[in-house]
Image: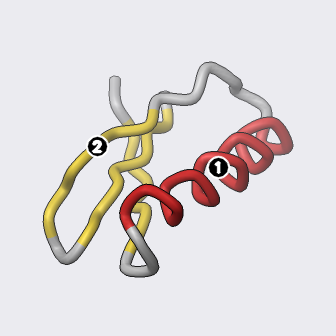
Amino acid sequence: MIVFDVIVDGTKVDTLRPMASKLRDLRNFIDQQFELLVEKYGQNVHLNRRFEY
């Protein structure tokens, strides 16, 4: 499963766990969530992708 760690100012604040498995669906999910994260935390938001087994 692919998960995305939300990094704000160098610290991990949240983890996004999308339920979709298709790349197109993942991309749409991340685009939507990233807009919400920028509104919530400001411009200094980064996402790190990792695999969780």
* Mark-to-mark CA distance, 2 and 1: 14 Å
Residue annotated with mark 1: 30
Q: Residue at x 57, y 29 (%)?
A: 18
Give the SS element for disc 1.
Answer: helix
Q: Residue at x 80, y 36 (%)?
A: 25
Total marks placed: 2
Q: Looking at the image, which is closer to me, 43 or 20?
A: 43
Q: Looking at the image, which is closer to me, 51 or 46?
A: 46
- Residue 49 lies in quadrant: bottom left
Residue annotated with mark 2: 14
Give the SS element for disc 2.
Answer: strand
User: Horizontally, is 14 left or right of 20 in the view?
Assistant: left
- Residue 3 lies in quadrant: top left
| Image x and y of residue 32, in percent | 71, 48
Residue 46 lies, with reference to residue 53, above or below; the image says: below
Identity of the amino acid at label 1?
Ile
Identity of the amino acid at label 2?
Asp
Q: Residue at x 52, y 61 (%)?
A: 39
Q: Of marks 2 and 1, which one's residue comes earlier in the chain?
A: 2
Crowding at dot 2, Cα within 10 Å, few <14 / some 14-19 / many 20+, comes out as few
User: Horizontally, is 34 left or right of 8 in the view?
Assistant: right
- Residue 53 lies in quadrant: top left
User: Horizontally, is 51 left or right of 32 in the view?
Assistant: left
| Image x and y of residue 9, in percent | 21, 76
Question: Which residue reaches farthest right?
Answer: 24
| Image x and y of residue 43, in percent | 45, 79
Circles 2 and 1 in contact, beta carbons < 8 Å: no
Q: Looking at the image, which is closer to me, 41 or 6?
A: 41
Crowding at dot 1, Cα within 10 Å, few <14 / some 14-19 / many 20+, comes out as some
User: Horizontally, is 21 left or right of 28 in the view?
Assistant: left
Q: Residue at x 58, y 57 (%)?
A: 34
